[in-house]
Image: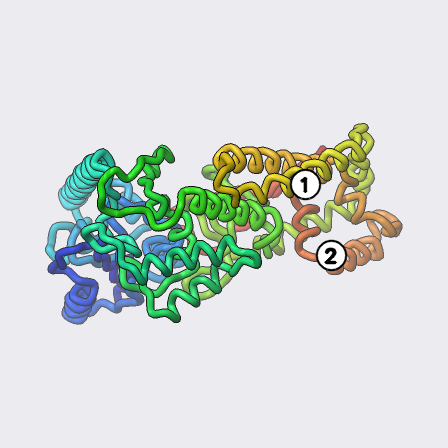
Amino acid sequence: MTKVAAYVRASVDFTGERWSVGTQKEVIARRAEERGWKIVDVYEDSGVSASKARGPKTDWARLLRDADAGHIDMVVAVDVDRLLRSTKDLNTLIDHGLKIVTLDGEIDLSTADGEFRATMLASIARFETRRKSERQLRSNARRRAEGLPASAWTPFGWTKGGEVVPDQAEAVRRAFDAFLGEPSLSIRRIREDLNAAGHRTARGSEFSTDAVRYLLGNPLYAGFIKKYSTGELHPVTDERFPPIVAEQTWRAAVAKLEDNVRRAARQGNQPKYLLSSVGRCGKCGATLVSGTNSQGVGTYRCGDHFHLSRQRAPVDAMVTEAVLTRLSAGDVHDLVVPKEDVGVDREALLTERNALVERVNELSPMLSDVSQPVIEITQAINDVKARIVEIDAELHDRSVSQTADFMVDIDDPVGTVQRREAVERKWDAWDMDRRRLLVDELVMVTIEPIRPGHVKFDPDLIRIDPSRN
């Protein structure tokens, strides 16, 4: 029985459309029953515009992963526009060995003529998408020139006509005050308060933490329109959409949001898996990220594009074995030269770092003073913090090597069972952060994309090269 993936998509639409997601599912299910197909799963990308990229978290990406795993043979959609945005999408499905059927009968890849027709239809779909995108860009530029926000959604805090909604505006001001207050409330707590008060986003849904971050960073609340492609700010010149908070308040919130992101990048959300941000994609060189496939099995995948997805456990086992073998080898002492011999003045770096931290502490309170140049102060703080990050990297780079640290107290003869057992015990005792640093120091791990027609794990596609000679 043919294993079918039902792909449905309803773009954001303000007028309603014939092919709602529910309707698409119904007609595909009827056709599958008529043809004797087995629908393995329904892949739904609702609200994803045809002009937006379908990233690794979309059902399109999940569909490709399931195709790689051999779970599906055919993709069915109601028409070309639902499934394909370009000839690249068509070629992607063909390269994954999938048959394609549209219920309007416009695609049939069983013949050369059918494939040619599909290519032409995909090209036309791409043309229509680009033309629509260009019209939207021109409309946005016109609205900015008129001093009006470009979004078709009614922003929270105003009516569609640009008049202030008093209770929503007060909720916005409370959110800014809570975020910038002392003590400040967390994004999560602000979200809970907004939802508890019965407020909803412009799209009618409850506030998420991302929606709260967007609210706090939205320049429209301070009387500005942002051109996101360049970062330019344009003042709202129309009497509609008057500002709800002061410019200094909004800029202080933006500075705090950016600082939270930098701090999280340095301290929080540390990778939990051996090769996350350490291994590389063999096609584009991007670092690997962790995830799960449709069966809930842990995977590594390309962090920038969907070039590959590989089960995590067998890859980790291969890399671990390579590292343990390297640490048990006779030339391991060539790897343990302390890095601090390069003569770096650690005391000078630490002194500079302490002074920079004090400088940040001096500048930060000035952001709440409306008489101060907030933009210049924010830039100065960002520059100082960037230098602190550089110093931290220098101090780490000049520290004793991970290999040297690992080999302390391991003095069993090379090549003996006792030596290998000692290495394994030390490896098991180390936490994941230290293992990752050790792997990064000893080897370069590159995962190549799977070959067409192969679905089983292939160890030959996992390259493990020494980082040092």
Q: Which residue in the protein does label 2 denote?
A: 430
Q: Secondary structure at mark 2?
A: loop
Q: State the image coordinates of residue 176 (x, y, percent, origin top left).
A: 44, 54
Q: Is residue 265 visible?
A: yes
State the residue at coordinates (15%, 43%).
121
First of labels 1, 2 by sequence position = 1
Q: Is residue 447 above or below residue 18?
A: above
Q: From the top left corner, tell me how far across and down residue 383 is, in percent.
A: 58, 33
Q: Answer above or below: position of 342 versus 89.
A: above
> Does 398 sit left or right of 260 as displayed?
right
- Crowding at label 2, few (<14), some or many (≥20) Cα neighbours within 10 Å? few
Q: Nearer the viewer, residue 404 or 433?
A: 433
The residue that appears at 34% across and 50% down in the rendered structure is 244
Q: Position of residue 67 (x, y in %)?
A: 35, 56
Q: How far apart in space, not on screen, are marks 1 and 2 (Cα)?
A: 31 Å
Image side of residue 116 versus residue 417, left or right: left
In the rendered structure, which amino acid carries the disc numbered 1? Val
Q: Quadrant of the C terminus?
A: top right
Identify the residue at horizontal 69%, vertical 42% (top origin).
442
Label of residue 357 in the image: 1
Q: How was the colour assigned to the protein in this rendering? A: rainbow
Q: In the picture, residue 15 is in which quadrant?
A: bottom left
Q: Quadrant of the N terminus?
A: bottom left
